[in-house]
């Protein structure tokens, strides 16, 4: 593995400096709020007037999200840990196949995988998060310098001791798994999901829709509404998608996002060029929730922004609470 470059060292030095400054400010704040000689508080508040976080409020973000590239060919299924992800992105790759990127913020499973390699368009997609940790099995040699310069904390095998292991019963490369707790001490919380997604009551309108199929040249996804579970049951290539624990993958919201897909300068060992999925810009989408479908517009002005989804009249389009799948597919 290539050594950590100067750009990453510089980012870490900035993080350390920021932490030191925050510690100094905190110490000054605690000193100013100490008890006064007469037993009162110098900040002028009685103890029962101190601000407290409401139990309904989510805790603030405590760190970066964890994004894991997931193998999605038939030999890699069933996968592990994907049901704990907050967001699952479906991305087109070489040969008309698909790969997943699972993003974790509110829960960290014991293991995730099988883990596979990164692509150039991952770097643009991940810019919406604050220096996310990106777990991947490796990347093409010419792509590695771009990953090193990107504002991500790259975590391939060998970067953090004990983070990866090889599972039994499957041949390589479909047997590489990640222990998320080796990369994050705890889940950072929902506030780390700076995607621009809005959650809440279902918008008005929409049309009844209990099944949607999305086709890639060599892959097929079907999402079927389950009224009893109030979730969309995932099938791939005609087979129900389950985890290694037997859990059916069932997001609350599915977004079919139509994007521009162009050819990148990178290619696989067979000479197939890697598609580059553009997630900055504008376009159309279909949002599935509660057994209904809404036509939508999406907008992401800059790479550092989240993606806004709106109804044709411009009103925000709320997602249902729970896991979200975003299926990135070539615009017609």
Image (cartoon, rainbow, N blue to C red):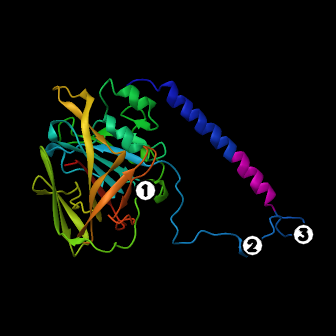
Quadrant location of the N terminus? top left
Circle 3 residue: 38
Image point 34% across, 72% down: which residue?
A: 203
Q: Is residue 111 visible?
A: no
Category of crowding for the residue at label 2, using alpha-carbon neighbours closer than 10 angstroms: few (below 14), some (14–19), many (at least 20):
few
Image point 77% across, 51% down: which residue?
A: 28
Circle 1 residue: 196
Mark 3 or mark 1: which comes first in sequence?
3
Q: Name the quadrant containing residue 148.
A: top left
Image point 11% across, 52% down: which residue?
A: 237
Image: 139 above or below 283: above
Category of crowding for the residue at label 3, using alpha-carbon neighbours closer than 10 angstroms: few (below 14), some (14–19), many (at least 20):
few
Find the distance from the CA under tag 3 to the CA under tag 1: 49 Å
Q: What residue range appears in magenta?
A: 23-34
Residue 77, percent from left and from top: 18, 48
Circle 2 residue: 47
Category of crowding for the residue at label 1, using alpha-carbon neighbours closer than 10 angstroms: few (below 14), some (14–19), many (at least 20):
some
């Amino acid at each position: 593995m290539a050594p950590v470059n100067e750009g990453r060292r510089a980012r870490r030095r900035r993080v350390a400096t920021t932490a030191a400054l925050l510690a100094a400010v905190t110490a000054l704040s605690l000193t100013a709020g100490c008890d006064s000689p007469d037993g009162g508080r110098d900040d002028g508040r009685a103890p029962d007037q101190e601000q407290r976080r409401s139990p309904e409020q989510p805790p603030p973000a405590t760190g970066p999200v964890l994004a894991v590239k997931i193998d999605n060919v038939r030999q890699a299924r069933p996968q592990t840990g994907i049901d704990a992800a907050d967001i699952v992105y479906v991305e087109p790759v070489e040969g008309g196949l698909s790969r997943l990127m699972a993003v974790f913020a509110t829960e960290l499973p014991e293991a995730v995988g099988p883990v596979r390699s990164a692509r150039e368009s991952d770097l643009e997609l991940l810019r919406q998060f604050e220096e996310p940790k990106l777990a991947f099995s490796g990347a093409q040699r010419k792509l590695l310098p771009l990953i090193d310069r990107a504002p991500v904390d790259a975590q391939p095998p060998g970067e953090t001791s004990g983070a990866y292991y090889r599972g039994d019963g499957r041949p390589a490369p479909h047997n590489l798994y990640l222990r998320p707790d080796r990369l994050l001490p705890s889940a950072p919380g929902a506030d780390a999901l700076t995607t621009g997604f809005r959650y809440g009551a279902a918008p008005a309108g929409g049309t009844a829709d209990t099944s949607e199929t999305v086709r890639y040249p060599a892959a097929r996804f079907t999402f079927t509404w389950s009224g009893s579970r109030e979730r969309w049951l995932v099938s791939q290539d005609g087979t129900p998608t389950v985890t290694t624990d037997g859990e059916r993958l069932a997001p609350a919201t599915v977004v079919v996002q139509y994007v521009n897909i162009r050819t990148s300068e990178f290619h696989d060992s067979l000479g197939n060029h890697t598609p580059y999925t553009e997630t900055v810009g504008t376009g159309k989408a279909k949002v599935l929730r509660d057994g209904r479908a809404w036509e939508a517009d999406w907008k992401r002005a800059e790479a550092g922004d989240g993606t806004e989804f709106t109804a044709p009249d411009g009103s925000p389009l709320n997602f249902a609470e729970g896991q979200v799948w975003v299926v990135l597919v070539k615009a017609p």
